[in-house]
Image (cartoon, rainbow, N blue to C red):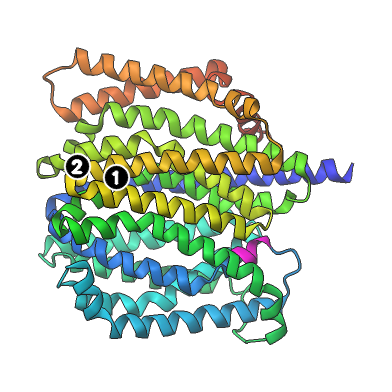
Amino acid sequence: MDQIAEHRKLTRRAASGLSWSGAVFLARIILNIFVTAVLARLLSPQEYGVVGAALIVGALGNTIADLGMSHVVIQRKDLDRRHMGTISFLSLLIATCLAVLQWLLAGQIADFLHVPELVLVSRVLAVMMVANAFNLTVEAILSRHLKFKISSMARLVSWTASHVGLAIPLAYFGLSYWALVVAYMAEAFILASIYFFIARDYLVSPRFDMQSYRDIRSQSLGYSLAGISSFTATYIDNVIVARLIGTAELGIYSRAFYLIAMPANLFGNLNKSVVFPLLSKVHHDKARLRTAQLKGYALTAALALPTSAFLCCFAKELVLTVLGQKWMDAVPPVIAFSAVIYFRVGYKVCGAVMLATGRSYRSASMQITYMALVASFAFFSAPYGVNAVAFAVSGAIVTSFILYAAVSCRMTGLSALDFALVHVPPVAFAAAVFATGSAVKMLLAGSPDYLVLATGLLVIGTLSVVTLYLRASLIFGKYGVEVLQSMTSKKLK
């Protein structure tokens, strides 16, 4: 009875976390579309390419500075204040060293990526590396305590203040790519300030303890290896585009990826901030873990596949409406990235299951495979242009998901038949979405792009709401409906 009560409690907290995180991420997507639409008309692909190259360097530093310790904070059961002090100390120390290294090697980094402007930009962005390391640790602490509402709101406030309050005005007054650089720095320091205030009861003074480090060393290194491999897989195609094709092409490629990353990150961040912490609580029970895995696939597929179908259908209208006419070259990459949204997010479900069970080295090996596929596909397609790279990388994502899903399902004992059946309702509904969108485009042929996009969104949105109200299982299937029922229980209302 105690286990049943605990299971119900975790389900309610999962539903609450999904509700809050989903609502906040959805609000951020809406704001993101507005900010992207404005900045795309104020900045050129070349300027976006400079910032995109700089963020690659910063993201690498954040990944190395973390050393997988944020995952240890979430997953490890016996974690005391000595462990937390050691983790905080190491994260801040490594981040400081990397910031100094980035400052000193800025010239070499700019030469390698063939972006001269990167010298000064890299040095300026190095300043925020310590703040980012602090933010990662605090986010892990809040996730460990299932404080999804607090962390979600903090991220939304910091992002809105920096991008709406700073990036747009600065770009309007002609600061070029520096508008984005200032915004990213401001976001990091605003978020750190908020976290320091709201999470002060959970924070521990940075203090190194050798025995605590020995306790977490093996596990953190495994997570670190997985994180670095994942980072490389995420950014290696950007590096190849910047070095072998050009900065302006990187701007187009990164904007197309960013536009589609909005919905993908919405679903992916739910996995990171909610699903992974909760799976970590039940990883000792294989039956519950398997059920949670099915629910994760069902929910992810029900959200991602129809979204993917809609974006593939209305890619041209979306680019012209949000980015403008000068970004027309981004349409083929948008289609390529839209087609694989589910595979990107489903890959994270596989990773959440594997990391929740503490198999960090197995996860790292899968990430290395993913990295190798993306790197090789992107490298050999680069001579044929940005579009070829986008479609090749999408193919690598699909291949990696199939491999990762096979390994994670074998690990939990999930059968191939159950895995396939959980995807049937979302696939069928996604086909209906694409057919409906195609019909709308045929009926409105010759109309303004924004009108076609708005009409398609209205029609498909109405279709989704009606289907969800009449029979939610047609979209979410059995396991997805169970999650929905938890989210709409009387207690949560």
* Stretch of the chain drawn in magenta: 71-75
**Quarter of the image holding residue 9?**
top right
Query: The C terminus lies in which quarter of the figure?
Result: top right
Q: Main secondary structure of the magenta part?
A: helix
Spatial separation of the CA atoms under disc 1 and disc 2 = 10 Å
- The answer to whether residue 97 is visible is yes
Whether the magenta-drawn stretch holds residue 464 is answered as no
The residue lying furthest to the right in this view is 1
Mark 1 vs 2: CB contact within 8 A = yes
Question: Is residue 442 positioned above or below 344 on the image?
Answer: above
What crowding class fits label 1: few (fewer than 14 Cα within 10 Å), some (14-19), or many (20 or more)? many
Q: Nearer the viewer, residue 379 or 427?
A: 379
Q: Nearer the viewer, residue 87 or 457?
A: 87
What crowding class fits label 2: few (fewer than 14 Cα within 10 Å), some (14-19), or many (20 or more)? many
**Residue 450: % across, % down:** 19, 30
Image position of 180 (left or right of 80) = left
Q: Which is nearer the N-term, disc 1 or disc 2?
A: 1
* Residue at horizontal 45 percent and vertical 68 percent from the top: 63
* Residue at horizontal 77 percent and vertical 39 percent from the top: 287
- The answer to whether residue 491 is visible is no
Query: The N terminus lies in which quarter of the figure?
Result: top right
**Residue 291: % across, % down:** 70, 36
Q: Amino acid at mark 2?
A: Ala
Q: Nearer the viewer, mark 1 or mark 2?
A: 2
- Circle 2: element type: helix
Q: Which residue is mark 2?
A: 330
- Circle 1: element type: helix
Q: Amino acid at mark 1?
A: Leu
**Quarter of the image holding residue 206?**
bottom right
Q: Which residue is mark 1?
A: 259
Image position of 141 (left or right of 29) = right
**Quarter of the image holding residue 333?**
top left
